[in-house]
Amino acid sequence: MIAMSRINILTLLLLLFHTLSGYSQQQSALQDTVQLEEVIVTSTKLPVSLKETIRPVTVITRRQIEQTPSANISHILQEHAGIRVNNSMGAPGENRSLFLQGAGGEYILILIDGVAINDPSGVGGAIDLRILPTQNIERIEILRGNQSVLYGTDALAGVVNIITKKGAEKAFSASLNTEYGSYSTGKMAASVEGSTGSLLSYSAGFSRDFSDGISAATAPAGEDFEDDGFSLHSYFSNITIQPNEKITIRPFVNLSEFQGDYDEDAFIDADNKAVVKMLNPGVEGRYKSDKLQATLVYQYTHTEREFESAWGVDEYEGRFQNAELFINYTPRESLMFLAGTNLQKSAVPERKALELPQLSADFISPYASILYRNRSGLAVEAGIRINVHSDYGRNITYNISPGYQLTENFRLFASAGTGFKAPTLEQLFGQFGANPDLDPETSLNYQAGANYRSSDNSLSIQAHYFRRNIDDLIAYGTQGYVNRDEENTQGIEMTVNWLATARLDLGGHYTWMRGETVLLDEAGNTLSRDKLIRKPDHNAGFRASLQLTERSAVVINGEYHSKRKDLYFNPENNYASEEITLDPFFLIHLYGEYKMLDDRLTLYGTIRNLLNADFTEIYGYNTLGTHVKAGVRFQL
């Protein structure tokens, strides 16, 4: 492995040296300003340009995904404001925990092409990040703040919308990607896409990611733990059929299988195995005229999870169906209407071996929203959603988001609204502590901020304040699951993106956040106020992308995380929780590429954790030191 690492480092350094050698010759070609391509944000369901949106949105392009060192979904998301993926630098077979503005993954809804995916077999219901490949991603939209009016349950902190590739302009296009590096980590991927004019377009492909990894758990002094690796196989395909200018039909299917090793606990080695599978087929139909657009979509998510340990084999299965019809109507440029109905059904099949019956619950949720904009600069979006749950009954969520364009370049925005998370099947009907009388967790959310964007779109600066209060948190008490506690979070988030020249792109972000969990007794009296676990008060990052020549580019990323609180359940102290303070850390990552054969062949290399920082993300678990990869992308 050491010899391979040296080869990879040498490959990357040679690549960077070659690109630097041509920099002085190309310096005169740099321009002072450039007009950026307009990006339409689709996850708002009222499509507006990124410049016009009155919500805090981040759009991650395909180019940024390709230039993310060691790109997996965790690393891609981690580079952006307000987002933290705990254990993203740990053993690749271990689970990842997603946080957005301090909220855990159970409050962040993952979408594929605007439609929610879910795993009803889990306690929190969130989909496992490890089974989401990057090969077929065209771009990612991150919509911050309460989105329960648009997407219902689980979206009270925001949504992450993964938008997949839909085809190419020419009849046939193929791409190949292979890479290899430290810890025997690699990828092999291939895809094809194309179109037959306006009638039909297609995209399909597969990828295999793998790694021998490192030991997940930290070994006590004098002990040597085995490595914990993983493999991910994924397949995708979609066809877009457009019989005329107004009608579009798109069937699709995504399939992933993850196999990984994991250890027993902090500082405890084990030969445990995890297998996670996801089957995700569906179909989308769309009718579009000058003022009206109607979308009908159905998507099915089937997940299977199996965990093998010294305690035996545990198997879980979840089935999630999501059907939605919504209509956009734009009677005039200043006014947009949205109305729709969403039907969701969650189920866990019967487990005969354990004599457990089938569990199921369903939602029907009509919703409506309106966006008004006038010439004086005022914009207001308001919406309401009525949720009817088969078990707990009905609840209503609302949101209002005003904005004001003070000048051509300067906009103020704000929002206030309510969100919710429905109790999961495990909490309502599961084996341990089930309570069929649970109510949904509810939240009150506020955001307010300002955005500056230069006339040529080369510079954008955004800052906003956010506050989220979640009530009726579902906690596990002496009598099982109950609605009891509270979680309060507030913070300030700032981002800067500057296209300094046609070839130099700079960006940075900073988040200050404070949050607490309030533990209550049965009478509603406060027992304690505890700081949120593994969530730093200060988080910052930067990105510098330099197009050195027409063929070569270098990208450097940095991330900083301040000290955090963690808990250690010490087996030598009867597993009582002990509070641990984790030290702050700073990481730098590097990416370089060189294009050949009319940009069809790209040679690239990455160095992650360039400075070989020694740090901890989760107490008792390892993190990766400096690791490198070299790869090739070929476009036919």
Image: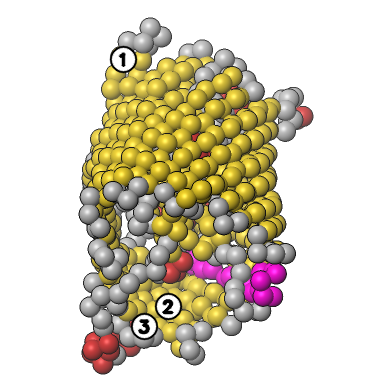
The answer for how far apart the CA atoms under marks 1 and 3 are is 59 Å
Q: Which mark is residue 140?
A: none
Residue type, label 3: Ser
Q: Secondary structure at mark 3?
A: strand
Residues under numbered marks 1 and 2 in contact, where contact means CB atoms less than 8 Å apart: no
- The residue pinned by badge 3 equals 552
> Quarter of the image containing the C terminus?
bottom right
Q: Which mark is residue 604?
A: 2
Residue type, label 1: Leu
Residue type, label 2: Tyr
Q: Nearer the viewer, mark 2 or mark 3?
A: 3
Q: Secondary structure at mark 1?
A: strand
Q: Residue at x 60, y 25 (%)?
A: 388
Q: Position of residue 395 (x, y in %)?
A: 52, 23
Question: Picture quarter containing residue 415?
Answer: top left
Residues under numbered marks 1 and 3 in contact, where contact means CB atoms less than 8 Å apart: no
Q: Residue at x 44, y 25 (%)?
A: 442
Q: Viewer-proximal residue, 608 or 132? A: 132
Q: Magenta part of the protein: which range?
A: 182-201
Question: Picture quarter containing residue 538?
Answer: top left
Is 4 located above or below residue 252 in the figure? Answer: below
Is 373 located above or below residue 497 in the figure? Answer: above
Q: Tell me which label, 1 or 2, sits earlier in the chain.
A: 1
- The residue pinned by badge 1 equals 527
Q: Residue at x 35, y 19 (%)?
A: 519
